[in-house]
Image (cartoon, grey):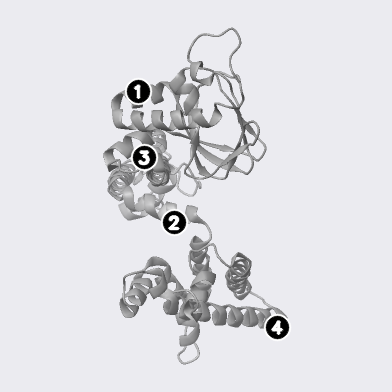
Amino acid sequence: MTGTARATAFRLMGDTVSHRGLRLIADAVLLASVLAAVACSFIRSLPAGTPAQIELARALGAAALLIFTLEYAVRLWIAPEQASGRNGPMARLDYARSFLGVIDLIVILPGWLALLLPVSTGLIELVDLLALLKLARFAPALGLVGTVLRNEARSLVGALMAMVVLLVLAAGVMYLLERNAQPQLFDSIPHTLWWAIVTMASVGYGDMVPATAAGRVFGGIIMLLGIAIFAVPTGILATGFAQEIRRRDFTVSWQAVAGVPLFAGLDAPRIASITRLLKPQSVPRNYTIVRRGDPADAMFFILRGAVEVELIPQPVKLGPGQFFGEIALVKDTTRLATVTAIQDTQLLALEVNDFRRLMAQLPDLKTRIEAVVEERLQTLEEAVPKLRNADKPQADPPA
């Protein structure tokens, strides 16, 4: 893939971290185009736009259309690079059928059709606003919204059905209560649906207000029910967001744990059980994670970043996939060295109680950790005298 023009375009437009400077420029151009399309829609909607404003809207729309068209063509071209194992036509079809691929096409299609056919100005304005959906590439939270809606579709449909049933019943009852007192307002059940909607939503525009005592009592009941019924989809979405975030965090942690050499060879269920015990931590540069002589409360696995173990005569640096803090847990003693983050570092912490429970459940993992401990103790033996007796009570704990 490297060395080809298409591969270079993929590194600029695809989900990669190389060519960061040029990638930022490409992203800035696309973001500016989205803003230009939205500004164009705003200006076109002005009831009395000046000739200068109309000309500005035309220029912004044309520039955004050209950039979006070029972007769509490039993304079709680089699709085979994104989908490894798929041939060119199938990879491009996959992109064209994807959500963002459909949005990319919808945003440019009316603009080009307008050159050949009469297209409604309102349609052009709506399509310009749809360009905001392209921001999903730059804001992962937008993709999270779509995932939660798909995951909770059945629950949301159930809540929506309950809401519709209550709306219709409320409109029917209020129509029967108010039709004689206010026939000009509550003249039919469909017309009364407007009252039911604004009352359940606690908006209360005041254009349809019950006049009878029974109508007012019933209206108060519907207001209270409306608060409860609108809280149902809110709770569903809040729970869905929390579950999806936990699921994604677990997936990231699972992949990180599976990449730790210490856990190489463990099957998926065992890695999953370890992942559930680990607690993520983020520490800034120059932050002291553990200090020599402190009680041992956890061991740490490095996800990203690097740390420095202060040893004599030469400090030791540890990077992603490595771990520290296990000696004090295995030997049941205080910390033997100070460990400081030399970069912004992400860690997974295994607390002492979980560590002991894990060692009891996985004897083979315990054997591996004890072997690593013995190896590190041999390395530290010259720097820290009598370290092998660290698990015995001493008046002055070893360094």
Query: Marks 4 and 1, how far apart in space?
Result: 75 Å
Nearer mark to the viewer, of 3 and 4: 3
Query: Separation of disc 2 and disc 3 at Cα?
Result: 32 Å
In this rendering, the label closer to the viewer, 2 or 1:
1
The residue where tag 1 is placed is 357
Crowd around label 3: few <14 · some 14–19 · many ≥20 (10 Å): some
Q: Residues within 10 Å of mark 4 (few under 14, many from 20)?
A: few
Q: Quick one: 90 or 232, which is closer to the camera? A: 90
**Mark 3 or mark 4, earlier in chain:** 4
The numbered mark, 4 or 2, whose residue comes first in the sequence reads: 4
Disc 1 element: helix
First in sequence: mark 2 vs mark 3: 2
Which tag, 3 or 1, sits closer to the chain's start? 3
Nearest to viewer (mark 4 / mark 2): 2
> Where residue 86 appears, x then y in whole percent?
31, 72
Q: Amino acid at mark 3?
A: Phe
User: Which residue matches tag 3?
Assistant: 263
Image quadrant where one finds the C terminus: top right
Residue 15: give x, y in percent of width and height: 48, 64
Q: Give the crowd class for mark 2: few <14, some 14-19, many >=20 residues within 10 Å.
A: some
Q: Mark 4 to mark 2: distance in Å?
A: 39 Å
Q: CA distance from mark 3 to mark 4?
A: 69 Å
Q: Which residue is labeled 2 in the image?
A: 143
Residue beneath disc 4: 51
Residue type, numbered disc 2: Gly
